[in-house]
Amino acid sequence: MSETKAPVLNLDGEGPLGKRRSQRIHLTMPVVVRGKIGATRFEERTNTVTVNAHGCMLHLKAQVTRGQEVSIVNPVTIEEVPCVVIFLGKKDGDKLEVGIEFSEPSALFWRVNFPPEDWNPEERKRPASSIRPPSPVK
């Protein structure tokens, strides 16, 4: 395996300019993560926490390292894509928060529609109530 330098990200998974490359969606989806720790292969079933067109955040028991090459499998479609571990976060019980990035962007891997790039979640408004107040009697 070649040495891969992972991009520098802050704790929110943003690049040096503070802007995300694709919209993050909170989605719990079953996946299988495969890789090697030393000479030993591992395969772990887990769920995503968030996904985007460039990868996902999930929790793993496997002791992966930043820059490590792994692959992720969508068990519904059986599609497998190569990835790199780019973020190691907080421990949650016996699992570690892990950010992985696809080797190439793959928005279709998740089989969901992502919001357009110019979509701003802060501008979302609640739908107006369909119940109108009663009109005053004349």
Image (cartoon, grey):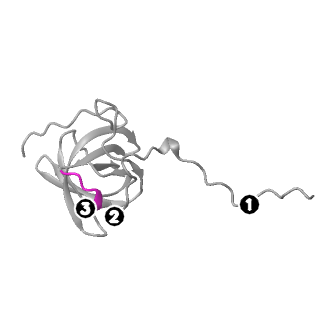
Q: Residue furthest front?
A: 138
The residue to which callout 3 is attached is: 73
Secondary structure beneath disc 3? strand
Tell me how far mark 2 sits from mark 1, CA to CA. Answer: 35 Å
Name the spot of residue 82 as percent of width and height, x first.
17, 54
- The residue positioned farthest toward the bottom in the image shown: 77
User: Which is more foreground, mark 1 or mark 3?
Assistant: 1
Q: Which amino acid does the dot numbered 3 rest on? A: Val
Disc nearer the start of the sequence (2/1): 2
Q: Are marks 3 and 2 in contact (CB under 8 Å)?
A: no
Which residue is disc 2 drawn over?
111
For the residue pair 37 and 49, the one nearer the viewer reads as 49
Is 45 rendered above or below residue 123? below
Location of residue 34 (image quadrant): bottom left
Q: CA distance from mark 3 to mark 2?
A: 13 Å
Eye-nearest disc, 3 or 2: 2
Q: Kindly indicate whether the residue at mark 1 contacts the one at mark 2 (C-beta within 8 angstroms).
A: no
Q: Is residue 8 magenta?
A: no
Q: Residue at x 35, y 43 (%)?
A: 97
What label sits on residue 37 in the rendered view? none
Residue range corresponding to the magenta coloring? 104-109
Disc marking residue 131: 1
Residue under the point 30% across and 30% down: 17
Mark 3 vs mark 2: which is more N-terminal? Answer: 3
In-image side of 86 versus 59 (left or right): left
Marks 1 and 3, the one that precedes in the sequence: 3
Question: Given the image, on which type of amino acid does mark 1 rest?
Answer: Ile
SS assignment at label 2: loop
**Image quarter in which the C terminus is found:** bottom right
